[in-house]
Image (tube, rainbow, N blue to C red):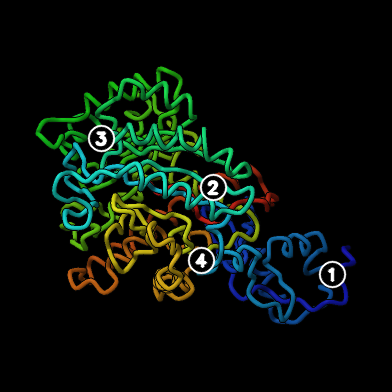
Amino acid sequence: MNLDYTGRAWRVAPRIETLSRGNERIFFNPQNVNPAYFPMGGSEVIQILDKLKQNEPFFCPQENLCPWDLFDFFVRHHLIVEDGQEDCKTACCEACGPGRDLFRTELNVYLLLSQACNQACVYCLNGRETYHGPGDPMMSRETAFQAVETFASSLSPGGFLNMVFFGGEPLLNWPLAVEVMEHCENTLKAKFPEIHFHYHITTNLSILPDDFISRTKDYAMTVLVDVDGPEDIHNALRPLRGGGGSFAFTARHIEKVAGAGINVALRTTVVSRNQELMVETARVHKNLGGSACAYVPLNAVDSDGSVFERAMRPDPRIYAQGLREVYHSQIWPVENLFPFSEFSRRLVPGYRNSLNCGAPRGCTPVISVNGKIFSCIYLVNNPAYETGDILKNDFPRLDVLKKMAKIIDVDARPQCRECAYRYLCGGGCPVGYIGTEGNDLASGQVRAYTHKIACATAKTCLEELFWSLGTEAGLWALTDCNNSQNGRGLCL
């Protein structure tokens, strides 16, 4: 008997979600998730909870109805809660709300070194009007240096400044990336000794500068490369700008970089053309020497607000099945398989995230070649989502962040607010919702796709992880509460 429970009024959680597989059951409280797995006896658990519910509030359940050890288990898994207890809001909820100062502790700063690209991807999310421009625009040294120093000075002591070299294709302006890293190491680390500097590049790697490997090693830069499937599929989706396939160049460079001992994570944009080849693509990633494998479904809208044809978008059901097949293939361990890796980090007691992305929190500023700051890599040069200007030193514009949060908050979004998974999901990548907000080109069908693809991602990953972890652990009690809940990871 736990004496802490006596003299207090209890009730069954207002909502308990159940997953069933034969005789197995997983139960969880959507308001405060700590799933409980029962390999058998799930029906009896439901009966016990139903009987307890008939006598609410209850103070000391009869031993013959609910033994104390089971009562304790129910409490720890939030299936039984104190009477009058309001919906759980963890410290994270209060810290992560719209306009909070998370941008003072960690920033993923995206420098658009080049808004030009040497590829002509058929699904490019960088719109011609908003991203590209005459003369293949490149970032200047002055803009890059000012951006880095501005954001370093905005962080609190102990903060993390993650510099992300992005494009377009950032390797078209590779010398500037080297200058930025040298400037951070040789000047800014001395000026801001309590700030941690890290470097990352997202590239198609169809070109390989002579000093790329040595510089990557010198500065411990992480690397993410897009490979969309086997050679014929990749070439069809990601041709070179001047014509011809890009796979042979990218594959050769990945093998060279990985062969030098550098981790190269590989990413696939899932579209209709490759949606049924996800397992095969996982093998391609492994055979190329990748260190991790990621799948990201196509957003329906590009940065111009133009809508991709239905024939280009993946079917959410086929995509979900592909995720399951890749997961069960065990080609990649969970920790190296996105999005499963992301959701596995969320499976801690009390995790609660109503905003899935760092953008409305100001954690992912994107610096365009002219020094304008935008909230997301997919919203560049969209004035509605401009969050500052390096020259004006006015980041962040909180009205923009709050506007974004209002659009994507799962507690406010009608499609999400009753979903049992919403605090583990966070609503998915918000770009689709933001891109369709007020967009006359976005039909009801497009909006439905945006929601369905987010649901397919979250529910597929979470349910597979629930069953795997439950089966491994028996009566499952999660214990690690010290987990990042801020959704500030690099955009894929």
Secondary element under disc 4, as helix, strand or loop, is loop
Q: CA distance from mark 3 to mark 2?
A: 36 Å
Mark 2 Cα shell of 10 Å, populated few (<14), some (14-19), many (≥20): some
Q: Tell me where residue 393 appears, x and y as whole percent.
A: 43, 61
To which residue does mark 3 refer? 172
Q: Residue at x 15, y 57 (%)?
A: 309
Nearest to the eye among marks 1 and 3: give it. Answer: 3
Going from the N terminus, do you reach mark 1 or mark 4 first? 1
The quadrant in which the N terminus is found is bottom right
Residue 24 seen anywhere in this rendered image of the structure: no
To which residue does mark 1 refer? 5
Q: CA distance from mark 3 to mark 4?
A: 38 Å
CB within 8 Å, label 1 to label 4: no
Identity of the amino acid at label 1? Tyr
Q: Is residue 266 left or right of residue 245?
A: right
Secondary element under disc 1, as helix, strand or loop, is helix
To which residue does mark 2 refer? 344
Nearest to the eye among marks 2 and 4: give it. Answer: 4
Q: Is residue 281 left or right of residue 237?
A: right
Q: Residue at x 81, y 63 (%)?
A: 67
Going from the N terminus, do you reach mark 2 or mark 1 first? 1
Q: Is residue 149 left or right of residue 313?
A: right
Q: Tell me where residue 273 appears, x and y as whole percent.
A: 20, 44
Q: Tell me where residue 452 appears, x and y as whole percent.
A: 33, 62
Mark 1 Cα shell of 10 Å, populated few (<14), some (14-19), many (≥20): some
Going from the N terminus, do you reach mark 2 or mark 4 first? 2
Mark 4 Cα shell of 10 Å, populated few (<14), some (14-19), many (≥20): many
To which residue does mark 4 refer? 354
Nearest to the eye among marks 1 and 4: give it. Answer: 4
